[in-house]
Amino acid sequence: MKQNQRESWTPDSTQRKIISIEEGCHLVLAPPGCGKTQILAERICHAHVMGVAYDDMLCLTFTNRAARGMRERIAENVDDESATDVFVGNVHRYCSRFLFENALVPAESSVIDDDTVVGILSMYLQEDEERVLDDSGRRREYSQIMFMAHLMFELRNGIPKPLRLHPECLSKDDIAVLETICRVREQPFTSGSVLDIYDHTDFFLDFVRSEGFDIALRQQAVRLLERMRYAHGYDAYRRQNNLLDFEDLLQFTYVAMRDERSHKRYPWIQVDEVQDLNALQLAIIDELSTLEFAPSGGKIVSGTGTLMYLGDEMQAIFSFMGAKLHILGELKKRCEGHIYHLGINHRSPKYLVDLLNLYAVKVLKADADLLPAPTDGSLMRGGELQIVSSDNIESEYVDVANMATRLFRDHPDETIAIIVNANKDADTISKLLLEKRQSHFKVSGTDLFSTPEVKLLMAHLSALSNDNNFIAWSRLLRGTKAFGTNSGARQFVHRLKARAITPADFFDYKDTTYIQAFAQAYDERALVVFDTETTGLNVFEDDVIQIAAQRIRDGMVVGKFCVHIATEREIPRMLGDVVNPIIEERKRNVIVTHEQGLRMFLDFVGDDVLVAHNADYDYHIMDWNVRRYLRGVKWQTRCPKCFDSLKIIRLLRPDLRAFKLKLLLSDLKLEGQNSHLADDDVHATVQLLAYCRRQGAKVVESQREFLGRKSTQEHIRMIRQNYGDMFVEARERLYDRPAKSAESAIVSEMKHFYQMARANGWMPETAKMKYVFSFIDNDILTTQRKLSLKEQLDNHITELTTLKESDLCGSSAIDERMFVSTIHKAKGLEFDNVVVFDMVDSRMPSYFNRNDYKGLAEDARKLYVAMSRARKRLVITCCKTRKVSGNVIPQHITRFLEPVLHLFEKD
């Protein structure tokens, strides 16, 4: 049993008040270091004591790291296994779960990242994908195309203007073009007319090039319409391949919740880092609450429940992701009379808290009465607050590297962070540290989990988890050098998917496919369609308590079987919200021993081929039951082949939104019922197989034609040669439970793949890979090392594929004491010693924000975030001169620090 940590923590007066808040809508403003994370976990304990069920609680965060931290605090503080029913995660994670669980998107959909978006668009624009990925300016242009696609979705679905994610992708000049097109065509300028232009860009490109169109606007019009055309193509590609990007998750969820309103609502919600959320995310949260609000984010008008927002307006630095500071102002209006402030800083000594508070008042215009007081009254002894200047930027880089190294040496039990404003600075400083052989961890630039090397490892795991994963196979075919480009790999997998083929077919069959093998067996052999009812979902330990089967030949039922089997394990009384019907059914039937029941079934099967729906589960739980109760009998030898109707229907109908038997019967209008009794489920599966045979007949010829092409055969040869044995051997390990638990099965598999990939020249050695392995092994799977690879993948594949490099910071995986990080990636972290690099007026604030009031204000908050990472010491560095176009330009320390300069020691 885990040691309960609550006894060692005593909340202060402001924390106690917030912990006990119930009913209504509340806003907590929480500056850094005030113990917010502990409060979030403690509130869950309190709410449960007050009668709120764990599965009626919803905890939403901005990042996966924050979610993981909250789950860890809950585990430390709540000695109750059912506490895992609390959903803890970011809004995107919740939306993904909502869409898939409610069958609102095709079940075979994959979520794509920004790099994959670039890859798709580069294919349409016929540009080199790798070059675009390395060109930040071109990437921004690609983002505008994606934003355009989403703006058109918002117009088509009536998403209100205040909730639109990127309306700025239509500039004033763009709008002038659209208005002109409508005026010339004598049409009103409406959302409908804009969508008409979007849906017919080729026609309108000809139109704006005609003599009747304003020549002064023609160039702008052509650029806009081409951007729309590419956006339309991006839309079409995602639909054809069942792909979702991160904006899709939000938009689809909002529209579904707004239109249906039959989804689960939560009487208890807490939302962390609310200042970093955009208006659409907050609108989704409104839809999830049992409280009802006035339109446009207004106050409560009806309903009961608790909705608490926590945030800090002084740390609002994510406007580039759609977060707007005015949203926090709207929440203040909503929560009027219910706004709270955490008043005590438990992290930093008085001199640091005083500095941050003065900066907040003078620069951020915060109310001094609402800022926290320190609990640590430690006085400065020298060197705690410093401003260090260098002659020029080149010497500043060297000085900072030297300073950090000294701090590392002089304070052997402390952490050091160099916080920079740009990735280029991080790269330069990191290089200097490496030259000095100073160990450190860099968190900037391309995220470690977004590198091709880590993505390839995750693709291997994803393909093992689901061998019909479009994105995983695309990455694998490129990463294992079966294809020379990402676009070529994606196009090949797309052609396979259109023909109901998965690359795994190439490893299991020489000249045919899974669908063809099924069709041949259906036509030429007897099939035994079976299903099991069990005491649970653990294939290794649970008992089979009912087996039902039907033998079919030529689609006709020619034999039936059913047996009920004894067990000493507890049979669950409920299956979700449904009373388990097997309990009453067993009262009306003869119960036989394990050995008798299993032998009876094997005798019924004989030499025929097995089929089941979700056969992976039924086949393997039978395997382990036979191992326990039929000594000397080898299930996989007696029954070597088992087709899976779930896999078959997924291949044939990837457009379906769900593949549970009950929903398939309804969607496909098939005879049968899914009653959670094995005999009923078998009858339903027989009907599904007949449908699959008819559907399969439609693709067999197309499969044969495609597989017969010389180019296809060469691709298949390369895929088999490069990856076939590796995939098959890994698949054979899925159900192996390790005898020893020194290392998790997932990490063992990742290391094996990594070694093979390096040996084959697919990837270089990656120094940081050790952190990936350590983090997954010790921070994610530490309690699951005895589980099989299959179990670990089922539990964690979604989490693994959404990891970020910043998740590693503060984890047991990182034994480094020195970090180099950008400001945005350092947010939420804390270090004993912080060096904030090159805080000069041309960079903080940015030169490009000099005439932008909102940009200036956000830059001021960025500096606050950087300084507030410090627990003990803070050093600000700057340079006196900088060369620009060959001219030496004087530099001055950032204007933001003027009100607090007197608190620093200066060199």
Image (tube, grey):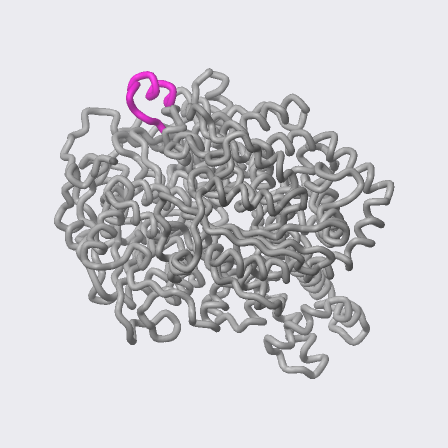
Q: Residue at position x 43%, y 72% from top?
A: 261
Q: Residue at position x 65%, y 30% from top?
A: 726
The one nearer the camera, 906 or 473, is: 473
Above or below: residue 400 compared with residue 8: above
- Residue 63 placed where, x, y %? 41, 46
- Residue 158 placed where, x, y %? 53, 73
Above or below: residue 866 compared with residue 531: above
Asked whether residue 46 is in view, the answer is yes
**Corner quadrant of residue 7:** top left
Above or below: residue 884 compared with residue 292: above
The one nearer the camera, 536 or 147, is: 536
Residue range in magenta is 403-416
The one nearer the camera, 627 or 468, is: 627
Q: Is residue 782 left or right of residue 378?
A: right
- Residue 33 placed where, x, y %? 25, 41
Q: Residue at position x 40%, y 37% from top?
A: 839
Q: The N terminus lies in which quarter of the figure?
A: top left
Asked whether residue 66 is in view, the answer is no
- Residue 849 placed where, x, y %? 46, 50
Q: Is residue 394 left or right of residue 277?
A: right
Question: Does 406 lie within the magenta span?
Answer: yes
Q: Is residue 430 left or right of residue 499?
A: left
